[in-house]
Amino acid sequence: MQLVGNIEDLGLGEILQIVCFSRKSGTLMLNSRKREGSLVFKNGQVVRATSSVIKEGVSDILIKEKAITAEQLKNALEIQKNEGFRESLGSVLIKNLNLPAQLIEDTAVRLIEKSVFSLFLWRDGSFVFELGDFIETPEIIMNDPLQYTLTNGLNPQFMAMEGARLQDEAGREENIPVDEFFAEEPYKQEALPLAAIPPSAVPSVTPALIQEGTVLVIDDDPLTRGVIRNQLVQMGFKASAFGQSEAGLRKVEELVSKKEHPIVIADLFMPTMDGEGMLGGLEILGRLKTDFQNIPVIIISEHPNSKTEKEVMDLNAYSYLQKPKKLQFKEDGTTPEVALFIEKLTATLSRLTRRDKTLVEPQFFMQEYLKEMEGGGGFLESGPAEPKVEESKGLRILKEMLVELSRPLSVSEIILLILRFSSEIMNRAVVFAVKNDKIVGQGQFGIEIKGAVADKRVRKMAIPLNEPSVLKEALDMKTAIVKRLDPIQWNEYIVRELGGYLPVESFVVPVVVQGKTALILYGDNAPAGDKIGDTSTLEIFLAQASMALERILLERRLSDKNN
């Protein structure tokens, strides 16, 4: 399966997010103005990456940092050649020269991050994403500039967030020469003397906090965190935004190690770090209060309730604020609801920092990676633009449907979106719900039944959970199935109730919410005799739909507890 598109239409950040959520394995290849790049994914994690503007490999870094000698490198290259390039140079150094595996892994991570971040500065070009496991053949290893594949992959969400920040910097500094763009600017501040501030205006907190610090906004919604960050910067605060808990906590550790005291603003409802829950803000608060007790944390939520507020304040959050609904956020932050929220937020931050808001906008720490790269001019446009490629149909549909899925939706609306997407892939489909001891019909498209109303027939369908069927098979395996229906009782029941057409192949995939199958999508190309086509984009969409359903479930539970 291939997804083909243009970088200017679907950016690298969006692709990284899609692959991460779908947990797919495959290779992404990019071309832009005679430059080439590639990323290899394993179960949604980045295990290797190369860029034609990054000339170094693992061995070059090890030599430069005197971790190995030129003689050791020569011996390793000789071993690799004599063994027919069956292993990467990094693996040879570990096995034959007894270099610590962690040293090779850490060196490769640095190079992979450099390569990926350089790709974010390519403003046009094309990409191809091919699903499938990456196989290191001797020919690939022989010509591999990196010479290592990570054992533990990197989270692409973190890379997407960092890359987006770099793109934002590049866009705002478009006319500045590249060498100046990557240069760091000293941070300036003009703090008011503490004596000028009445003690009653400041809450009782640890004295170390009453000083300037970076505001870290952690929210999984790109528009929300972008608006909050931009508004804070305009108000004079030094602020950075993160879409993932791990990235925000990593930045806290970095700042604390530099003797700085950041302030954290975290959304209550966002994925937890293990991907199994949705109260990520509560998790962030708990971890910070365990590891960094003096870091003030402000929790924000568009669905506040007294029970959650008590939990948050019991964990010693500095404040708990209601934020506007997603639809009330605009890029310029001009809606009344957002303006009122920002006013409350800045008032809270001003009490914490004891100062007027006169800071300049910060330089982002990611530039530390990039200013070390060779040939800085190659990151931006370096040659004639290439003609656009024809985008994959499935990719275009996926992009449109993910926008739809980002809106606040009900369960029935999500089911309709699933059926809409399925209609682009197959002739007909049915969404089933798993309820107690049965699998029951919920909705359909494309089903034609002589002398009957298809919607009514589908809603009356009920298949026992304890009996074998293709639906039960997908539920047990928790993965997509494409197969010809076995001639068993409940498969024959499905065929009969859906009009009596036996399809050449059927597609069945479970939608898993919090570890349990909530919905099952069944589809086929009956009454035509066609096989099931490529369903990869549909499976990616279903992975995103499961997260939307999980959010709805958590919101309902909180509402029920509050009532």
Image (tube, helix red, strand yellow):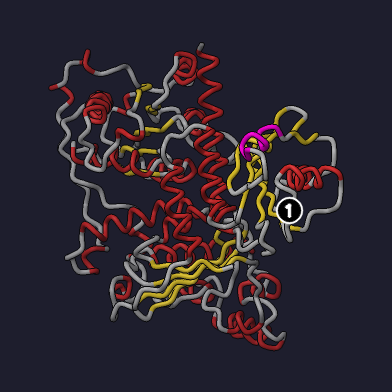
From this view, report whether residue 54 is shown above or below residue 554: below
Does residue 461 appear to the left or right of 61 in the view shown?
right
Question: Of residues 188 and 223, which is closer to you in this image?
Answer: 223
Q: Position of residue 444 (x, y in %)?
A: 60, 42
Q: Secondary structure at mark 1?
A: loop
From this view, report whether residue 172 is shown above or below residue 468: below
The residue drawn where x is 32% and y is 67% is 123
Q: Residue 306 sits in which quadrant?
A: top left
Q: Which residue is mark 1?
A: 501
Question: Of residues 402 and 52, which is closer to you in this image?
Answer: 402
Q: Main secondary structure of the magenta part?
A: helix
Query: Looking at the picture, which amino acid does disc 1 mark?
Result: Tyr
Q: Residue 14 sits in which quadrant?
A: bottom left
Q: State yes or no: residue 308 in magenta.
A: no
Q: State yes or no: residue 459 in magenta.
A: yes
Q: Position of residue 458 (x, y in %)?
A: 67, 37
Q: Which residues are magenta?
A: 453-460
